[in-house]
Image: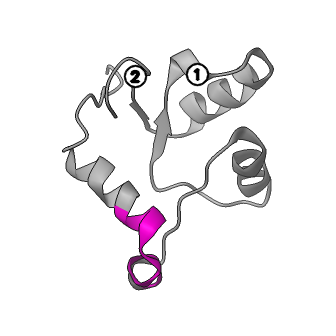
Amino acid sequence: MPTPHITSPSNPRVKNVVHLTTNRHHREETHQTVVEGSREVRRCLDAGVVPAEVYLCPELIAPDDQDLSLRLATDYAILRTSARSTV
């Protein structure tokens, strides 16, 4: 099954991520937060946190983080974004 590719900032999932990052009450109500950056994602995974969703932009993955990208793609459903889009 191909990885879903999100290209629109009006996508409901993108809107939810933005809402999570900007609204503390929404984070508290949903018991969710947004984790950004390879170091922070590694720390969460190593602590046993299971992500609800993973958003990945292949064009922006540093060579040193290819192993993390593979780990995420192997263990979790990925939603792919593009550096070329407005998302």
Q: Earlier in the sequence, mark 1 or mark 2?
A: 1
Instruction: Tell me if mark 1 has few (under 14), some (14-19) or many (20+) residues whose alpha carbon lies within 10 angstroms of its own.
Output: few
Is 5 placed left or right of 27 in the picture?
Answer: left
Residue at the image position 32 percent from the left and 19 percent from the top: 2
Question: Residue 4 appears at what percent x and percent y?
Answer: 30, 28
Q: Which residues are magenta?
A: 19-28
Question: Residue 63 appears at what percent x and percent y?
Answer: 75, 15
Q: Secondary structure at mark 1?
A: helix
Q: Secondary structure at mark 2?
A: loop
Is 48 placed left or right of 15 in the picture?
Answer: right
Q: Determine which of the numbered discs, if any, sits on residue 73 in the image.
A: none
Tell me which amino acid carries mark 1: Leu
- The residue tagged 1 is 60
Q: Nearer the viewer, residue 14 or 44?
A: 14
- The residue tagged 2 is 82
Of helix, strand and loop, which mostly describes the magenta segment? helix
